[in-house]
Image: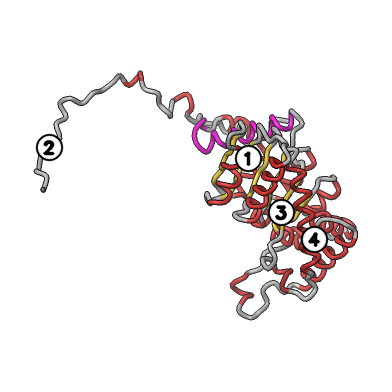
Amino acid sequence: MPFPYEEFDLSGVRTYPLASRASKARVADFARPVARGGTFKAWFDSLPALLGAQDLRRVVHALVEARARQRGIVWGLGAHVIKTGVSPLLIDLMQRGWVSAVAMNGAGLIHDFEIALSGATSEDVDESLGPGRFGMAEETALLLNEAIRSGVERGQGLGQAVAAFLADRNPAHAGASLLVSAHRLAVPVTVHVAIGTDITHMHPAASGAAIGEASLRDFRYFTSCVARLNGGVYLNCGSAVVLPEVFLKAVALVRNQGISLDGLTTVNIDFLRMYRPQTNVVTRPVAGTGGTGISLVGHHEVLIPLLAAAIIENE
């Protein structure tokens, strides 16, 4: 039957003193103004101790603690991170000892390779796809596939092979290359490829056997790096699918062998929260281990420089 028009009786509503309530936002946690000419540290310390700003502080704290305790710090880098121009900052962090290993997807490898060769990367797909020119840069296709094939013959992984290939040739812009810097600093680089996703796979020089063998070898190298992350930090920057999936499988293998990842901090940095990074990086790997998962939402070209500057201030 229909309900009547009847106002709810509010005469018995119960209240409590405001001061007795636990509140999530407090004046003590608010931002503070910064004086003109202040230092970066003064600005960073002035950020509110709330939400994203507090998450950024938590990541900085985890990185500083990991380094102080000589625990691992592994950076997973999607291609977009390299295209946003933060490679010099990541190279500086390598030189300062804030990078234990680097993992990339196939597109990240290509962008870094092109930067080393020509100082530029990231073609206009809309412009080049129609006339059939997309992905057809000759040096990228021939040299990268050559580096992978020759590296496999020497028993190297994909990242190791291409990094050594570039370092040996010392191209004009080697100083801006993560691969070259990692090779010279003995920082392991692994590359995790999905066949058919990268422009280098479109060329007759591509060898599925070599790419597959080299990338599988890199998965095993990467798993060894993850196995050293007890109390350490793993950062997934800008990879929405491939690296989160690879990381989860590496965690599964490490746990299968009874190796502890207690105290691990996982961090995802991207301008959107997406399913796989949130689930396979931030949530699942630290569940029930005393670890922490943190998601930083924002642009790589802003967040990574902020993160780099903040941890350098703590050296």
Residue 264 occupies quadrant:
top right
Q: Distance of mark 2 from mark 3, alpha carbons? A: 62 Å
Q: Give the range drawn in magenta.
A: 48-68
Residue 266: assigned label: 1
Q: Distance of mark 4 from mark 2, alpha carbons? A: 72 Å
Mark nearer the N terminus (1 vs 2): 2
Residue 80 occupies quadrant:
bottom right
Crowding around mark 1 (Cα neighbors within 10 Å: few <14, some 14 to 19, many 20+) is: many
Amino acid of disc 1: Thr
Residue 213: assigned label: 4
Cβ–Cβ under 8 Å for marks 4 and 2 = no
Residue 7: assigned label: 2
Mark nearer the N terminus (4 vs 2): 2
Q: Residue at x 80, y 58 (%)?
A: 158
Crowding around mark 4 (Cα neighbors within 10 Å: few <14, some 14 to 19, many 20+) is: some
Residue that carries the numbered disc 3 in the rendered image: 104
Crowding around mark 3 (Cα neighbors within 10 Å: few <14, some 14 to 19, many 20+) is: many
The secondary structure type at the circle numbered 3 is strand
